[in-house]
Amino acid sequence: KQEVTQIPAALSVPEGENLVLNCSFTDSAIYNLQWFRQDPGKGLTSLLLIQSSQREQTSGRLNASLDKSSGRSTLYIAASQPGDSATYLCAAHPMDSNYQLIWGAGTKLIIKP
Amino acid sequence: EAQVTQNPRYLITVTGKKLTVTCSQNMNHEYMSWYRQDPGLGLRQIYYSMNVEVTDKGDVPEGYKVSRKEKRNFPLILESPSPNQTSLYFCASSLTYGTGYTFGSGTRLTVV
């Protein structure tokens, strides 16, 4: 059964640093992997979607990569800002899931001014 | 604007009083789903619908009902809410299988 793990659970960095959030999954048979952002008590905002045939996707200061062979995805945030503080979740869409996403527990990111 | 709209955003109710949380999407998506999010347990799927009149159970369907009479709407019904259904609920939609998901802003439900 697919499992998704995010490490670290929490991360605190000074403003301006580049950083990498990690997401690993146990089964490479996925349709896609999606990264989301969640602010405290708020909804889920989709950041990037990487299809299984793609290696990476970029949106502004965000870059997400996907390596199915190693079961890893990374979210790279360039020039971090205090407004980037949030919990970041990754979710894998397994091929045998009947539409269900498998979620990581999230990384809580704090950007210090 | 393409979006998934949930209502209400916040709801406090008493045990046993039936309630409905509405969900509507304006993107002509085939697939819709409900999740609940609880501290330490993450996001868990309650029900999903692959198209009109087609619904199926997710991981935690007990105590919930859904219907999909129209493509755009997917209400979540709690016939007799209990305190263990206090949670943050999300509705999501997807164009079809294997495409990305759009989530609503969430409904924070408290059952006392």
Image (cartoon, rainbow, N blue to C red):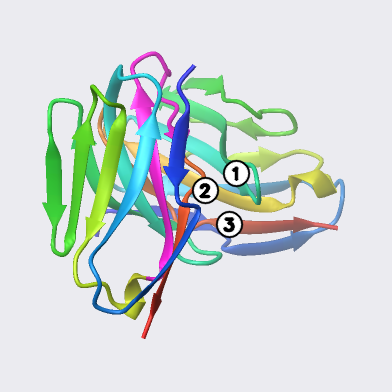
Q: Is residue B101 above or below residue A12?
A: above
Compare residues B71 and A27 and report the one nearer the observer.
A27
Q: Is residue B51 above or below residue B42?
A: above
Measure how far apart labels 3 and 1 are at the Cα level: 9 Å
Residue A34 highlighted magenta (yes or no): no
Q: Where is mark 2, residue-wise?
A: B90
| Badge 1 amino acid | Arg
Image marks 2 and 1: residues in contact by CB distance under 8 Å: yes
Disc marking residue B36: 1
Judging from the image, what secondary structure is the residue with disc 2 in?
strand
Residues marked 3 and 1, same chain: yes
Q: The numbered mark 3 sits on a residue in which chain?
A: B
- Identify the residue at horizontal 66%, vertical 28% (top origin): B61
| Badge 3 amino acid | Thr
Q: If the image is split into quadrants, where does the N terminus of chain B sit?
A: bottom left
- Identify the residue at horizontal 68%, vertical 62% (top origin): B11
Q: Earlier in the sequence, mark 3 or mark 1?
A: 1
Where residue A22 sits: x, y (%)? Answer: 35, 46
